[in-house]
Amino acid sequence: MPPRQWQPAPPRRKQGMGVAGVLGIVFGSLAALFVLIVVGAVMIGGSSGSDTTTPIAIPTYEPSDEESDEPAPTRDDEPAQEQEQETADPPAQPALNTSLKNNTMYRAGGLPRLTCRAGNASIFSHGQLKALILKTGKCMDRAWRPILEKQGIDFSPPGYAIAAGRGRGACGDYPSAGSMVPYYCPRNNTIYASTSAMARGNGNARGYGQIISWHGGIISMMAHEYGHHVQNITGLMDSWWSATLDTGSQNTKLALSRKMELQATCFGGMWMRSVAASYPVSTANRGRLFWFYGQVGDHPQYPRDHGSPANNNRWFRQGWEKNRTFQCNTWRAPSSTTS
């Protein structure tokens, strides 16, 4: 059931927000990528029945290596010189696949179960919420680092800039004007957030605290932003941006944006499940999280850039219930699940 203190508000039309605004702000070439990626939380309306959305089944990722009927050569078949060379120089790591559909990260499997206790932080206290964000950020590092490095992906953690009110960073103001959402800036690999905006709102944007007062809601959103960092270091973000630049169709640009955002939501669901036992996420709070993700996303009169509330719910639950990176492959999913 939805928290009693929140009542849906009528939708307000965004002003001056075209595709350039919803996808980000870019200066220079792809090599100097400057994109503002936000979690797009339009917190209005939505059906309370969204939490029953069934997760989808994504086909298991299979390597594209071609099979051969020829028997594998034995060491006896190799010239002595080649055997010596093999001993001297260990085989090189296979090249990483940074594509959207067949990215190396889909081989990484699931996130390990971690101990990450949240305590009783209040989302309305800047000091307590900031400390919780930084603490859980380190838990996200511990979860993602080993499974990505095992696949040969260079891992580096994101930075954090957490303000009580407003601030300015490499991707501009945070929060953005009229917004309360945190965002990830790939220009300097940093997650920006305003604790007061997230908890209480900013301008016409209602705060998360008006929908879900439990801190797990905000931390799950930070896990979504961390998911954008994962997309960045695995090459998914560059591939997404290249595909965005390659099309002149606004509908295609928006479809690409939705897949990118819903994948980050799925990664966020994976992490929340990995710490559920220790955080802890009680049965009641799990239900609140699922309901919460049925309220955020694209509503009528807003750009269709982050996915419908039903599909945000669907992909958060996909990550939570499946906890496998290949199960978050929105690029292979039916279009109806990324609308």
Image (cartoon, helix red, strand yellow):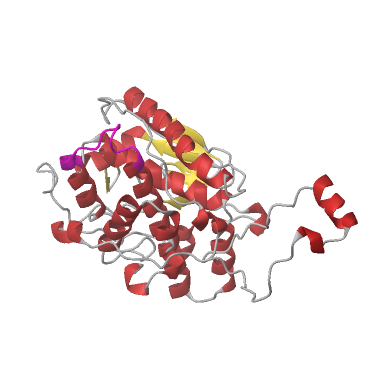
* Residue 211 image point, x, y percent: 20, 44
Horizontally, residue 332 falls left or right of residue 278, namely right
Give the side of residue 155 with respect to residue 89, left or right.
left
326 or 136, which lies in front? 326
The residue shown at (34%, 63%) is: 307
Q: How many marks?
A: 0
Residue at the top extreme, as displayed: 127
The magenta-colored residue range is 274-285
Question: The C terminus lies in which quarter of the figure?
Answer: bottom left
Q: Is residue 147 magenta?
A: no
Horizontal side of 95 relative to 277 (left or right) equals right
* 286 versus 9 height, above or below: above
Residue 153 at x, y = what percent? 60, 48
Instruction: Give how far across and how far down residue 296 sits, in percent.
Output: 27, 54
Q: Residue at x 74, y 62 (%)?
A: 74
Residue 31 shows up from this direction: yes
Figure check: 65 above or below 147: below
Q: Is residue 18 visible?
A: no
Q: Quadrant of residue 308?
A: bottom left
| In the foreground, 256 or 65 | 65
Q: Residue at x 81, y 47 (%)?
A: 87
SS assignment for the magenta stretch, majority: loop
Choose between 50 and 148: the one closer to the eye.
148
Q: Is residue 118 above or below residue 147?
A: above
* Residue at the extreme right of the image, as rendered: 81
Please provide percent x and percent y for residue 129.
Answer: 33, 29
- Residue at 9% x, 43% y is 4
